[in-house]
Image (cartoon, coloured by chain):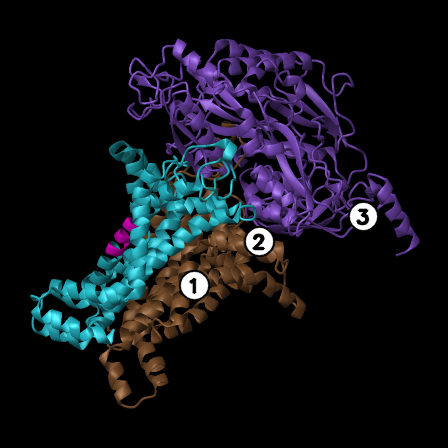
Amino acid sequence: MFNYTIRRLALAVPTLLFISLIIFLVVTLAPSDPTANLPLSIPSEVRQQIREALGLGEPVHIRYLLWLEQFFWNEPRHLLEEAFGWNLGAGDEPRILSWQTRSPVVDLILERLPQTLWVVGSAYVVGVLIALPIGIISAYRQYSWFDQLGTFISMIGFSVPTFFTGVLLIVIFSVKLGWFPSIYDTTHKVTDFSSFMFQVRQMVMPVSVLALYNAAQISRFMRASMLDNLNQDYVRTARAKGLTERVVVLIHVLRNSLIPVVTVIALGVPTVFGGAIITEQVFKVNGLGQLLIIAIQGGDVPTVQTLTFIFAVLIVLFNLIADILYGILDPRIRYD
Amino acid sequence: MNIRHLLLGAAASLALAPAAFAERGADGHVSIIYWQAPSILNPFLSGGTKDIEAASLVIEPLARYDQDGNMVPWLAEEIPTVENGGVASDLTSITWKLKPGLVWSDGSPVTAEDVKFTADYCMNEEMGCAQGSKFQGVKSVEVVDELTVKVTFEGPKPFPYGPFVGAQSPIIQKAQFENCTGAKAPSCTDANFGPIGTGPFRVTEFRPNDVIQMEANPNYRDPNKPAFATLTFKGGGDAAAAGRAVLETGEFDYAWNLQLAPDVLANMEAAGKGKVVAGFGTLVERIMVNLTDPSPNLPEGERSTRKHPHPFLSDPQVREALSLAIDRQLLTEIGYGQAGRPTCNVLPAPAIYASDVNDSCLVQDIERAKKILEADGWVDTNGDGVRERDGVELRILYQTSTNAVRQDFQALIKQWWAEIGVATELRNIDASVFFGGDPGSPDTFQKFYADVEMYANNFDGTDPEAYMANWRCDKIASPETQWQGENVPRFCNAAYDALTDAMARTASIEKRAELAKMMNDILMQNHIMIPLVDRGRVSAHSNTLGGVVLNTWDSELWNAADWYRIK
Amino acid sequence: MTDTMPSNAELEAIRPPRSQWWDVWDQFKTHKGALLGAGFFVLVILAVVAGPFLWHIDPTYIDIRARNQGPSLAHPFGTDQLGRDTFARMLAGGRVSVAVGVTAMLLSLVLGTAVGVLAGYFKRLDGPLMRLTDLFLALPLLPLLLVIIMLFRDTLRAAFGPEGGIFILIVFVIGITSWMQTARIVRGDVLALKEREFVLAARSIGTPPRRMIRRHILPNVLSPIMVSATLGIANAIITESALSFLGLGFPSDFPTWGRLLFDATDYLQQYPERVLWPGLAISLTVLSVNYIGDGLRDALDPRIRGR
């Protein structure tokens, strides 16, 4: 397993380089334009000058190599300098600048990470935590009222899009009842209990919308996989041996049912860092998802490229983690 | 509550502008929401309206426009004119005088050097200044003395109020931006995110594309203003959410540009927490007619160029019929409510420039449209509901950007055109593509690979000279110009070009108005474009926010210094 | 049910031998939820296919005087902000949404299962196929869509007409961007299955890979595939509505359920019934597919079938 991990990690480098090239080509080929959001009163000569100042006059391969240099050489040095106060000579080296804000993309990402992790991250954790027991109970008591209700709610949760559930919650809880703020305050700092309560109040709605959506999906896979295993011969054997029902279900069946669930959860973790575009928009959380969507709309190639690439790194990483977990969950799986 | 406060309260209930009596910062906190989030506070690096308006709280121009479109001196003592000697009699230069005693928010004095620096900053070609057109034709900017600056133009400039006027062209501090010129401009993140200004507020925290925190400028020129000590400027979301936050939940005090269906807005206002305010500028929603053939069967490079006239839209009768079939009154009612007026002009304002000879289009006349088509030989011979002539059928591809109101307009107009025997296929395109200038994309509004397209356009300030020059022959978007160019209908008329030349030489405002009206009438009577709605700006403020004067000619936040809390 | 059992057995005795699919159908019939789901799904299909022939109002016809009306005899579901009949729009929209949902789901399922099974079963293919999956997971969706529109819309429009071309494009786009999760899940399950005793046994008697996959692997990964199918259909219906905002979807006056839901969200407070219809239609369709999937899975599982 160790060899396998090392081999996969080594393979990840060329894979990621290739992915970064494809992403770059897609983002560059896309017909959005950095001057598209400017008022039409700005004439086309000025627009052309703006594009040239952004470096759009350079050929594509030069722009790609430039990005590679900035991302893999300049940015890490800048981060280290900032973190430890070392001098690595990166002071004047160009960093990856967003075309919209003209500020370093990495700083933008770091600034937005907290609210994304708070909201999207906790929604994911909450989603997983409610999905697993619901999936297990639904499978164990298949076709009981609990299972039927769980099925119904998770289908609604998955098939009604967040742009609707978000607005619905705002109308009920912010407009009619006035319990929760409809606009997330990203500058809020938790210092004491009352400010913590405020943070909780402003997180309730976006977290529940996202958690419902995540839980719906994961609980379905959990249930299906449990059902597959509950009828296996080994379960009968375990019961015949006189093991308690709790041990049979929660140790033997659960462990063997986790493979698809681990896959789904591992696929979901990178999307946490990608933010939740629609939910963030609806509640004005302004995290990484909102950063990505306005960068796409604004034709901001460096931001889209950098964000997507970080996203790709996480995908590769978490899929590797999932593969390793398979081996732990089921020792018969061997990759060597 | 002491006696002074009681008196103040009494004054507030009597006087209209009690803020004049208040102390700076006495009214606490004010919060503003823009559903587009500002990316940067340097208008020279980003021309986006959201960025310009957010920056207008901090940095100010020499003169700006008031709510009626009149120019008012802001950092300047007075508006220079030929009469007061500020503008040279040969119209080649203008001399601005700063108000004495102005200081930046860091306490240093504002001088003519700063004004000159601002011009040099934007005119540096390596920078790609977003407001470059404001400085077009400027030969040099010289410092005459501490407070006087002289702008010299390359030739006579009948309208010399481009540089330093309006929210698009504010003065920045030389000391702060000195090392940020040319190609280095984008790298000065701190300066671009927190410019030092003369405005009522200064930035304490800027989170790009998210939120700005500001506080009252301690060195603001009026010691009693602004009434608010702190200000939050939140961005992001959509217009409905912004409207809800002000009108229904009361979380915010001011919401910008609420482009919502009139009944949705009215319902929000009925919640009673705030008021909707509307004002009109020069923004006209219009349908552009393609005078050239966009057929995909033509080779790339000849599609939508003047080489191939449009098979039926080059016929003025067809264009007239299309215009007549539209009920502008109804479009306005459904799409914009109190924030729109039906219009028959592409130049609807200011009042002296507005022509009134085209107003017959305000009444929908389907029968006449049919008659015109029939008289012109367009008849439906094969009974499929679509008229044709010489084998050419009246089938139109109608494109616009994605936007709920525009899609409603498309559906309505499609139905009216069907009534007169014109078939329409609708297409909507993401705004970032439609308004983007990517020459490789088939879907930009300049490339115009469709028969008609709809969008809105306007001009900064009150002078339409540059705007009317958009439809000159040399502004036609074509493959030779990489599809850059404002003349998207591909209209070319020597008489029209002559009028724009004449306007560039004429100084008298009455004569200029006459020329502009003539140009507008040429465009309208040839139905080169079909104006639909004169779109106003709709914003909302809470019932407790006083002093709001909606201004469509300049930044909406132009008078934030006068805002106060109604208690 | 127990008292009907003997008679069934008697019947079976005199009937000729039946194929496996009859057994599957018998088991499927006993699953109440599945029957109900299948019934509802057939009803939806009937309604959207035949409905427009029975309900004559044109879904794009604007009757401006009748706008924003509540449910009435003339307009059972009310009208929208332009006075278009919501019932007619639901029927017409359902046709597109169901067609797009089912085809795109099938495409993504076939792709995902194929990639997953191949990667899980053949060690040589695992690396390349999974790296391909990583690539597709990492691609930024919106710019990718914009590129696809730019490259293919006009060609497809010329070849299949405006509506046919766009239908193909949408199904292709949704299918090609949503198969990765299925692929990863199926592969994970196949990796584990491959080491099970029955697979080893089958392999040791020389079963060729193709039959191994068909007889032993595929039936055992059916349940996650069924879940993916249910989630996939919901995903496709919603994604279709998102696409039309990019200008990739059907023309703007062409109703679909996702679009109706999005348009109605702004009017949530004034006309709540307007969000109800598309919301319910999407949820119930997805729910019915879910129950069909449940029933099918049970029916195809030989261990349950005998019970």
Mark 2: few/some/many CA within 10 Å (<14, 14-19, 20+): some
The residue under label 2 is which amino acid type? Val
Asked if residue C101 is positioned above or below residue B172 in the image, the reply reads below
> Residue B282: x percent and y percent?
61, 26
The residue under label 1 is which amino acid type? Ile
**Residue C284, quarter of picture:** bottom left
| N-term-proximal mark, 2 vs 1 | 1
Residues rendered magenta in the picture: C102-110
Chain for colour purple: B
- The residue at 29%/74% (across/down) is A327
**Residue B553, quarter of picture:** top right
Is residue B49 in sight in this rendering?
yes
Closest to the observer: B142 or A285? Answer: A285
Q: Classify the position of the N terminus of chain B by image quarter.
A: bottom right
> Residue B126: x percent and y percent?
52, 35
Q: Is B558 on the left-hand or right-hand side of C159?
A: right
Mark 2 and mark 1, same subunit? yes
**What secondary structure do most residues of the magenta stretch adopt?**
helix
- Reading the image, the residue beneath label 3 is B24
Chain for colour brown: A
Q: Residue pushed farthest bottom?
A: A242
Q: Residue pushed farthest right?
A: B3
- The residue at 20%/75% (across/down) is C196
- Reading the image, the residue beneath label 1 is A153
The local secondary structure at tag 2 comes to helix
Q: How many marks?
A: 3
What is the chain identity of the residue bearing mark 2? A
Residue depth check, mark 2 versus mark 3: number of the one nearer the observer: 2
Asked if residue C79 is positioned above or below residue A199 in the image, the reply reads above
Mark 2 and mark 3, same subunit? no
- Reading the image, the residue beneath label 2 is A171
